[in-house]
Every structure is written in structure tokens, then in C-alpha cells.
Image: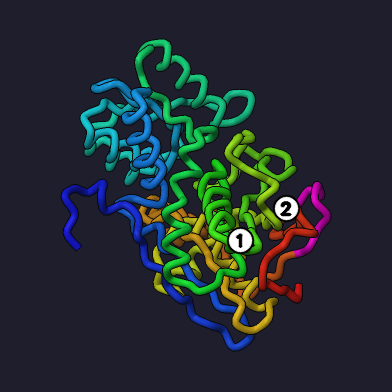
Amino acid sequence: MLYQNLIQSIGNTPLVCLKKESCSPGNVFAKMELLNPFAMKDRVAKQAILEAKRTGELKEGAPIIESSSGTLALGVAMVGGFYRHEVHIVTDPRIDAITLRKLESMGACIHIVRKMSQHGWQSARLEKLQQLRNQYPNAYWLRQYENPENPKSYKMLAEELLQDLKNIDILVGSVGSGGSLCGTARALKEQGCYPKVVAVDAVGSVLFGQPDKPKRLQGGLGNSLHPPNIDHSIIDEVHWLNDQEAFGATVELARIEKIFAGNSSGSVYAVARWISRQVRPETNIVAIFPDRGDRYCQTIFDESYRLQHEITLPEQLTPQKVSYGTVVDRWSYSRLNQGANHGKYTAVY
């Protein structure tokens, strides 16, 4: 397919049917958002920046600033740089060498905070970002955690899913800023599709009533802050995986499905596959895979790193069901909205 530029190629990612286990009556379809030019958040960068330019919030030639330790930074550098805006990315020491080199190659200005503040790396980055706002008063701050253009950018993703599947019974996605899962779920419901919405989070993330563990190893999902873009009312169930479980599932995703992805995708894969064993026949489960595995070459996909952090490949993990608010340290899940209408979806777990 011919595009006039790389920005036009964002979206229209493949939907792949994953291998079906003999004990799994449900079907799992992976939405391969990792096959965008950089990753899923290319959609956010494109939507937010073009809308800001349309409304005049982003002036011609003005700088763009954003806080990101991962894929949004790449999307902003790509889209902002393409439209001749100087891009400033505030990040922290967790940024991997591959992402750093990609940002540098696109000409982004990178600001790395060196220590956590009161609420971990996120708040330290936001403090630095505020300094940049003072330095560049005409700069556009994308604000992924609260910008409504973040969830709006996933309307197209929902439309793509409805073009490919006659019915979607369960939607599974990781949560960090809240944009992808909540935006996709809301857009599906606006189109008359009412899936059960399952959020995937990290143990040690505060997004769903857990205590903060700023030194957790997982990246790409979870948060130490509460982003306004998370709409808890649209989410029916949440699963938490710890670092060992998430990383083990990510390696297993590559080994079994040949999908080289990051730990957000690995965690979503573990949850979607487990759900597929619990549901009635022909239940359609869509799992959003947001990120590639490139930035985890020296961590998740490095055997010495896994040995150092006691990460083993689980034979078959089973989550524990807990009441919402229970502090967890291993894979657990909790129901949020018991009485929601899920269309034709009927679960047995």
C-alpha cells in the first residue's frame, strides 16, 4: 500500500488469531499495535499533534515537550519532527539504549532525570517538564495522562476491530495512561458493541487501589500516579502480574507465538490466554499488543538478566481471585463492575 509519508501509515495494524489450546474453548485475537512504525502510541502522537496544530494550540515551529520513558516518546519524535517542531522528551534512567538511540537519530532533545522524587520517576519527570515549560513558554505539552485526544486516538482502532470481527465478547488491554483500553472500549460501545473490558496492570502500580512500588521492573504499563484518562467505570475486571510473571509470559509469547514483544504485550497475552480457558465455546477475546521487544533485548530477553532476577518460564500460572482493595504480590484479579451489560458475553469463571 502506497503512503505519501510515514505518518499516514500509522494504524490499520493486523489482527492475528493466536494458537488455540485443546483446553481453550475461547478464541484469542491479537491486535498487533506493535506493528505501527514504532508502537501503539504512534496513534496518540499523530492524533494529539495534528489536532493541536488544527486548533492553533501548537503554533508553527513551536517546541513540543512530553514525559515518556518508552514508546510515546518515539511517536512524538516521529510526528513532531516530521512537521518541523523541536521535540523535547523528559525521561529517566530506565530508558533503554535502543529507544535512546532512536530518539537521538530523529533529532529529539532528551532530558534524563537522575533520581526519583516523592512519587517515583513519574513525578520527578513532571517536575523537570515544568522547568522546560518555564524555559519554553510557547511550547506544546502533549499531556498524555489527561489529554482527551489520547483516548480519542483509539476510535480508529475500534473501527478496525469491528471491520475484522463480527462480534467481540472480551477486550483485554494493559493500562498506563488509560488511553488505549478506555478509548477503544468507549468507541466500541458507541458502535453498539459491549465487550467485557479487562485491564492488565502491574503489581506495585497505584492505578487500581494497590500501594506504589516505584522500583518495579516492568515498563509500559502501570503508574505511580492516577491519570485522569483512566475511566474506571468502563472497566469490568483488573489483573495484576508481578515482574517475574510478566517477564516469563513475554518470553513465552515469543517462544510459542513467535511474537517478539514487550512486557505489556506479554502480560496481556497471559491474561487473555487464561480467560480463553474459562469461557464458553466461540467466545471472541481481543488482546491489544502495544509494544515490540526491541527495548527489552538486554533485560527480558537476556538469559543472564532473567537468572539475576529469578525469572523462570511458568508451566501454567493460575491467578487468584481477590476482593478489590486486597494488596497482592502475585497474579491476581478482581471484579470492578459486577452488573455491567456485556452483550452476548457469558463467562463461566
Can residue 272 be seen?
Answer: yes
Query: Taking 41 as reference, is 81 above or below it?
Result: above
Image quarter for residue 146? top right
Q: Nearer the viewer, residue 80 or 318?
A: 80
Main SS type for the magenta part? loop
- Residue 167, position as x, y percentages in the image: 55, 72
Q: Is residue 304 visible?
A: no
Left or right: where does residue 182 sit relative to residue 56?
right
Q: Is residue 275 magenta?
A: no
Residue at 62% over, 33% down = 225
Q: Is residue 326 left or right of residue 111?
A: right
Q: Amino acid at mark 2?
A: Asp
Residue that numbered label 1 is attached to: 245
Q: CA distance from mark 1 to mark 2?
A: 11 Å
Q: Nearer the viewer, residue 124 or 231?
A: 231
The residue segment tinted magenta is 320-329
Residue type highlighted by circle 1: Glu
Q: Residues within 10 Å of mark 2 (few under 14, many from 20)?
A: some
Side (left or right) of 85 relative to 161: left
- Image position of 327 (left or right of 343): right
Q: Earlier in the sequence, mark 1 or mark 2?
A: 1
Q: Residue 189: which quarter of the image?
A: bottom right
